[in-house]
Image (tube, rainbow, N blue to C red):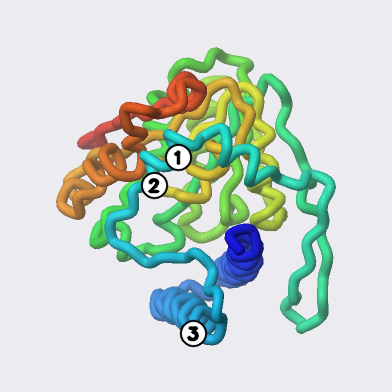
Amino acid sequence: TNITNMKRALDHFHNLSTLHDWRRQAILDGEDNVSSWRDLDEAQRQYYLQEMANDPYPPPILEDNSMMMGKLMGRYYTQLRTFFAFDVNGERSFEGKDGKLETTTCCALLPDPDESVMHFRNYEAEMRNMVHQKGYEDLSAKQVSNELFGHLQPGSKVAITTRLIPGGDNSGVDDIVHELQRRQIKVRVIGNQTGVQDFCFLIHAQKEIVGYARSTYFFWAGLLSNATLIRSYVVDSKSNRKNKVTNQLLGGLIGWGQDADPALLDRFNVTIYSKTAED
């Protein structure tokens, strides 16, 4: 029964991934009305409630304001990596904008072995006015270049995955590229891929994978990746402290616990960066 329930849960997550792909495409199309995201969140909530009400064996999905994710991941790190194996040769079908069924491969582009891979979550473009209100403030482009990637030498390579195509309104990606190129770092932005293909790109990083700790998308990519180093960062700023984001991320999401798997502790690095005055 537990296996059956877990398979049901994965089917639900597949449908949720389809919703997130729709959300990503809506951003690319310029549909950035905040109320639409709230409508989507409520639709997801109602979907789960309906499914669980109609299913005598509902999937193990709980809604909680204080999940012990960090400790669970820390203790069962190796087992979870085995259970959630990614099918690199798989295909995924979804309903396109014209209503027709489309099929894409789960993987497309892959990172170079010596490439630092960054997931740029880009809250600024997606949430705009809600960034400071909800505590989603990220590093500036200069800080990404000089602090987050300050260890890289000229000629080093960086690949950036993001939800938005660079050059889009307020995307911020171009600024990061510009700042890195000023230091003679070779940068490429991975665009025009599905969310699943970007996830595949991230977990195939070999040198290092870098991303904001508040992004659960990056969090899972880091857990399932084979990168030598997983660098998760937390942004300490006035608005983030006001929303208790800094302490929440450090103590809740990435509080691995005393019995955490040594393999996880050796690879997963968490660093706090303070938002500078110029930003």
Q: Which mark is residue 73?
A: 1
Residue bearing the label numbered 2: 69
Question: Can you see residue 231?
Answer: yes
2 and 1 marks in contact (CB < 8 Å): yes
Q: Which mark is residue 26?
A: none
Secondary structure at badge 2 equals: helix
- Which residue is nearer to you in this view: 11 or 34? 11
Residue drawn 65% across the image and 38% down it: 82
Q: Is residue 248 left or right of residue 6?
A: left
Q: Position of residue 58 (x, y in %)?
A: 53, 74
In the displayed orientation, state which residue is furthest to the front.
Answer: 1
- Which residue is nearer to you in this view: 18 or 123? 18
Residue bearing the label numbered 3: 53
Q: Is residue 35 left or right of residue 6?
A: left
Q: Is residue 128 left or right of residue 101?
A: left
Amino acid type of disc 2?
Met
Quadrant position of the N terminus in the picture: bottom right
Q: CA distance from mark 2 to mark 3?
A: 25 Å
